[in-house]
Image (spheres, rainbow, N blue to C red):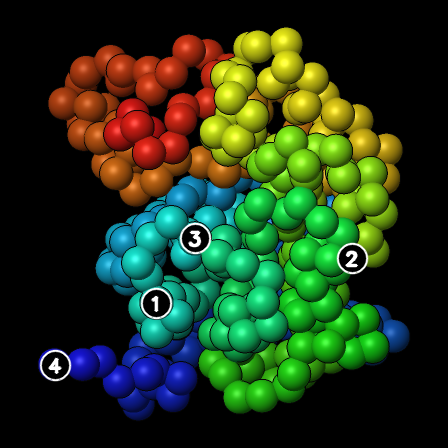
Amino acid sequence: MSRKPIFVGTAALLVCGAWAMRAQQPEPAAGGQHKLYNTAKQKLLAGKQIFGATVMSPDPNIYCAMANSGYDFMWIEMQHSPMTFEDVAHMIYACRGASAMPFIRVPDAEESTLQKATDIGAIGIIVPTVDTVEKARNAVKYAKYPPVGRRSQGSGQYGQLWGRDYRQTANDNMFVGIMIETPIGVENVEKIASVPGIDMIFAASTDLGNFSGHKQGDPEYEAMVKRIHDVTLAHGIKLGGPQAWKDRPGFTFFQAPSETALIRLGAQVNLGLTPSPAARPGVAVTEGTGKE
């Protein structure tokens, strides 16, 4: 039996979630300006570190448990998972009012992809494998409304999540992050970082090795990370990486492990066991190895 879209919830859901809806309504500040309701972006702009757990399961209960556990944002994984936009729309709506902001790693920077991601209520977009200035520009262009970008104004559940004046507040609250994951991207990082509207550049740990043939700790690998680090910070952009890199200087945006890793860790804590480290301290796990 197929699920119906929940862009308009049932009366029961609306009543039960009324407090959450009110909690997410942006309140006008003095002078008619709107405050940031993207609390993760607000915290990052204040110079603090933010963390987001990775979710690959379409189960709203799992999503809500993670989104209310203390993370700043949820890294909703749509590049390397079979989740559909309908799945993610259900997850975000079911957990409206959660403390963690809904960010989506999209599979590409195409207009149709970013339009769907933003229409269902994501206020953070993370674009993988950015090698070119054009792809970086598209990330900003299709995530933001005119005059900054060319996002189309259509229907969606964003208004139920973020308020009736969403169109006027969306650009300030939308977070745009891109990932440098290849030697080509590293070579072009100076030009990429010059694109206006990028909030964060992520030095991707696994794919830097995957595409270059070098592993963490190799001089060639660390030289690529250093170049991303230096250029990103020089352009006043926030720097992201895996949670294992939280002690590296300059990094403030972090992708935390997935639900399977968190369940394993929670079970070990529940049993009174010493949690087994997934990797050496300061070394990010390799995605796809089953050791996350």
- Asked which quadrant contains residue 256, the reply is top left
Secondary structure beneath dot 3 equals loop
Give the tally of numbered discs. Answer: 4
Mark 2 lies on residue: 197
How many other residues sit within 10 Å of disc 2, few (<14), some (14-19) or many (≥20)?
A: many
Secondary structure beneath dot 1 equals loop
Up-down relation of residue 236 to residue 73 (above or below): above
Pointer 3 or 2: first along the chain: 3
How many other residues sit within 10 Å of disc 4, few (<14), some (14-19) or many (≥20)?
A: few
Pointer 4 or 1: first along the chain: 4
Up-down relation of residue 120 to residue 243 (above or below): below
State the mark number for residue 1. Answer: 4
The residue at 38%/49% (across/down) is 80
Pointer 2 or 4: first along the chain: 4
- Please tell me which residue lies in front, 117 or 159: 117
The residue at 69%/63% (across/down) is 138
Q: Is residue 280 left or right of residue 227?
A: left
Proximity of marks 2 and 1: CB atoms separated by less than 8 Å: no
Up-down relation of residue 204 to residue 113 (above or below): above
Which of discs 3 and 4 lies nearer the camera? The answer is 3
- Please tell me which residue lies in front, 232 or 272: 232
Q: Amino acid at mark 1?
A: Thr
Gap in angstroms between the C-alphas marked 3 and 1: 10 Å
Q: Amino acid at mark 3?
A: Gln
Mark 1 lies on residue: 84
